[in-house]
Image (tube, rainbow, N blue to C red):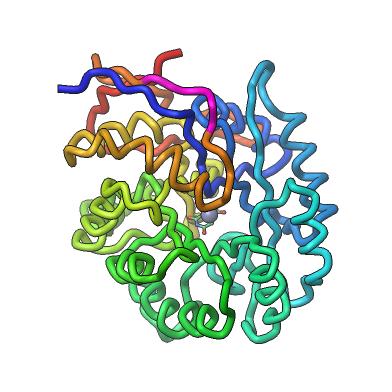
Amino acid sequence: MIQRITLRRPDDMHLHLRDGAMLKGIVGETTRHFARAIIMPNLERPVVTAAVALAYRSRILAALPKGAVFEPLMTLYLTETTDPADVAAAHASGLVKAVKLYPAGATTNSNSGVRNFDAVRAVFEKIAEIGLPLCVHGEVTDPSVDIFDREAVFIDKVLDPIRRNTPGLRVIMEHITTSEGVAYASAGGTGLAATITTHHLIINRNHILAGGIKPHYYCLPVAKRESHRLALRKAATSGDARFFLGTDSAPHVDAAKEHACGCAGCFTATNTVQILAHVFEEDGALPQLEAFTSLNGAAFYRLPPNDSTITLTKGQPAGWPEKILTEAGPVTVFNPGYPVHWHVET
Ligand code: DOR
Ligand code: ZN
């Protein structure tokens, strides 16, 4: 039985770092284990231009704990007024690695997102030409579509037409939550990939709703039924290069989660690597863990894998803080609901 495993240092290909006091309070939770992360642009004032992205990058670097070695990989928030030339300039800077598509109204701070997908056609064409990936939040926002069906409907009604109309467009389906998402990503060829979160490998919708509502398990896209979770587990642990880790670790203070209209997001930065070792071991897939956390994402983003490594060992149940205390308020760390015996060596 494997008791110790060394991996290239992981990358988190989908991360919310926020800004200000929250950024300062939580960034060290990621830099402890990860070398790089794709930084989501959905700040209260979204990261809509190259200049805004570079300023945000400087604030992230300024907030890093002493001695941390970490590279934020920046993204641009796509709006209907995004200038393709600005996107090209952002790409040329070498510091912006993707454009993020939020359907307007789909999730936290998405009101500046896209309502009319034809309005952003010129940006799709430009990024297809320069090879910059489009990270897609794949949910329709039509109120008549059941929230548990919004991902599958998005794939059929929005994503597939966009891909057919834009040859060469490189797409990352972010945080897929359904067997339909797995199937579509699997059939898509080399220009298509998907990130999978830690929490969607652990929870299904019963965890959120049965036996009392659990606000800290509420995120978007919302966890689906068990058959979908199993499809995600199979994809993540397969070693298939099209699937890689994007935690979607999304801190909100407890007061905003434990609320009559609670915010979406699970905070998994602190314990993702330990939990993933548990999940991959459970599925007999520890040899595939490095591909998921450290190789497949880098390859899709055309980055070299990290030179440094981390080592995990199995032992006593691992401990982590129940909450991260930030100056913005306490943030609850994701609770997988069972003991995890994997530790990251320091
Ligand atoms: O659960 C989520 N939280 N899903 C998202 O798409 C956004 C994120 C956030 O920013 O809070
Ligand atoms: Zn996200």
Give the camera-side residue of 213 and 299. Answer: 299
Task: Describe residue 43's horizontal placement relative to residue 341 as left or right.
Answer: right
Q: Quadrant of the N terminus?
A: top left
Asked whether, in this view, residue 319 is left or right of residue 314, the answer is right
Q: Is residue 202 left or right of residue 257?
A: left
Residue 59 in view (yes/no): yes
Magenta segment, which residues? 306-311
Who is closer to the viewer here, 284 or 102? 284
Count of marks placed on residues: 0
Is residue 307 shown in magenta? yes
Residue under the image location 64 percent in, 57 percent down? 98
Seen at 67% across and 54% down, the residue is: 75
Q: Residue at x 70, y 35 (%)?
A: 21
| 300 relative to 169, above or below | above
Using the image, determine if residue 311 lies above or below residue 14: above
Residue 212 can be seen in this image: no
The image quadrant of residue 110 is bottom right
In-front residue for pair 308/282: 308
Residue 318 appears in which quarter of the rendering? top left
Q: Position of residue 340 (x, y in %)?
A: 26, 27
Query: Residue, x 76% and y 61% (percent of image)?
Result: 48
Q: Measured from the top left, where is residue 118 in percent x and y? A: 65, 86
**Picture coordinates of residue 307, whole percent (x, y):** 54, 26
Left/right of residue 341 with respect to residue 24 in the rendered view: left
Residue 341 part of the magenta-drawn span: no
